[in-house]
Amino acid sequence: MGERMLAGGWTYERLAAKTAEERFNVWLNAKAKDAFDAQELARFIEDSGLDYAPTGGISMSDPRVLEMRDVIESPEGVAACLRATADGLPALAGVEPMIVARMKTRYGSFSQMTVTAGSIVGELMLGKGYRIASQKKMPVGSVAKTAAFWEIR
């Protein structure tokens, strides 16, 4: 990311030295301003791969959660969850590659993002008539380590 200077004198290195909650406050303040450079700072934080969330995880109204929900609940996301389940994998294993492809560094094992993705998948699967059968390891290379395995009720 280098020494690119952003609004308020922020750089990647300076942001990286802050806690997730401090970065969240910088992001929140930047989002609240209409100035182009403030919006640029907010986008930079979103794309940096650095965690930025208030203590306790991510809000269900956070734009990243809404983006995950869009992917998971899309026709392709639903099909991927059902296909993974039919193949004996956690439903999340089917859709997580799609989440990663769309969100890149905005999705990761921070701010309980993988837990939140699993919860959204859980809502979907319950609505499709499934119940949790067990927890299974995710495939090698996945961001999430484990996820629910579903079976039809």
Image (cartoon, rainbow, N blue to C red):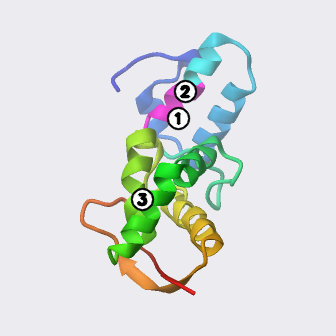
Q: Which residue is at 40% across, 48% downward? A: 98
Q: Is residue 133 above or below residue 72?
A: below
Give the residue type that dot 3 points to. Ala
Task: Give the secondary structure at mark 1.
Answer: helix
Q: Position of residue 62 (x, y in %)?
A: 66, 46
Dominant SS of magenta comes to: helix
Q: Relative to the observer, which residue lies in front, 44 or 19? A: 44
Q: Earlier in the sequence, mark 1 or mark 3?
A: 1
Report if residue 44 lies within the magenta region: yes
Give, as a three-letter code, the residue at label 2: Arg
Indicate which disc, 2 or 3, sits on the residue closer to the N terminus. Answer: 2
Taking depth in this image into account, of 126 and 51 the one nearest to the observer is 126
Query: CA gap, disc 2 to disc 3?
Result: 29 Å
Find residue 87 and report its horizontal and vertical position in percent: 32, 73
Q: Are marks 2 and 3 in contact (CB under 8 Å)?
A: no
Quadrant into which the N terminus falls: top left
Q: Residue at x 60, y 71 (%)?
A: 128
Write down the residue under mark 1: 46
